[in-house]
Image: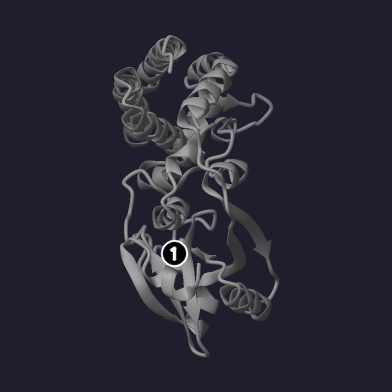
Amino acid sequence: MNKQELKNLPRLHGQINTCIDDNLEMICVGLNRLYSLSFYDLWDFKYNKREDKISQRIYLFDEVNKKNIKKYNGIVLEDKQFQKWEDTLKEIVKNLDLDNPVMIHMYRRLFPWDMYYNMSNVPDFFTHKAMAIDIDSKTILVTDGYCNKFNEYIEIEKCKQMANNKLTIMKIIDIKDIDLKQYFKEFKKNQINKKDIFKNIEKFAKDVTEENFIKELEEAQGSLYKYSHMYNSITKIIRSRKKIKRLLKEIGIKLNNEKIVNLSNDFDQTIMNWEYVNSLFVKYTLTFRIEDLQKSEKYLLKIKQIEEELLNKLERIEV
């Protein structure tokens, strides 16, 4: 995509999107490619008991899966980390000259349009990715769907202060049209092979009243919780369910398959319960009432049952 095409990309921020999602989806919409197909592996819940902290035991397959984005969206993502800003800047210039969009990684607490701007207690694992689309001797032209800022100039010297010298290069390649019926069959088969999700949710449920989890939550007392690894982990799980809901809805509509659309709607049950569990964790950091963690254990076991039934419904759908 040349610089003019990048400037004319459709402007959007998806409600469930991260800043990376927004950058990628703008390109996909411009290319008439269905971004949600890259959510292929997101219905997952892995739990590594070897980690000491409960929050670090939870992880997804990959929230932004480079393999799937290449296969289904025709965008190759390449991360590059530099030591010096001068090298970072050279890489930005080189790729924009090659018509490759570039995501610049910046600390959220230093990014001028982000909701966390100038908040001293925001940890550095919270980064923001704005898409560079043009550059001159003094400024970088960026677009940022996440903050609803499009074609905005940032002074290069200011960008130097905000950036952590990491870039994600986006190279656009040609792909064949995706056969959605075959895609759905493969998605279903892949999901049937991931039944360890339910065992892992049950393991997590049993750990939420353990002493080390209580200690972890108490360290994130009150307003600090939203900056914690636990909040970040559960937020990713909630977002993954919302993305699977969206994926199924878009496939169902395109295939004119009511059963797939209905399954998409059924995901509201698990999304609502995951959100409630997270709210119980928030509540505990404010009140330290063990009853809230006991209640969260019950709701996690309820989620396990709901998601097992969702998988059973998926298995019964034919296209």
Classify residue 271 as left or right of residue 184: left
Classify residue 173 as left or right of residue 284: right
Regarding mark 1 in the picture, which secondary structure is present there?
helix
Q: Which residue is mark 1?
A: 109
Q: Residue at x 40, y 22 (%)?
A: 293
Classify residue 291 as left or right of residue 47: left
**Residue 85 screen position, x and y as percent:** 63, 77
Res. 48 visible in picture = yes
Which image quarter holds the C terminus? top left
Camera-nearest residue between 84 and 102: 102
**Number of marks in the image?**
1
Q: From the viewer's perspective, is residue 129 above or below residue 261?
A: below
Classify residue 230 as left or right of residue 15: right
Camera-nearest residue between 297 and 81: 81
In this figure, which colouring scheme has been used for the structure? one colour
Res. 281 visible in picture = no
**Residue 48 screen position, x and y as percent:** 64, 26
**Residue 217 screen position, x and y as percent:** 46, 34
Q: Residue at x 31, y 62 (%)?
A: 148
Q: From the viewer's perspective, is residue 267 above or below residue 84?
A: above
**Residue 123 screen position, x and y as percent:** 50, 55
Q: From the viewer's perspective, is residue 247 above or below residue 86?
A: above
Q: Residue at x 40, y 11 (%)?
A: 313
Camera-nearest residue between 224 and 158: 158
Q: Amino acid at mark 1?
A: Arg
Camera-nearest residue between 51 and 268: 268
- How busy is the neighbourhood of tag 1: few (under 14 within 10 Å), some, or many (20 plus)? many
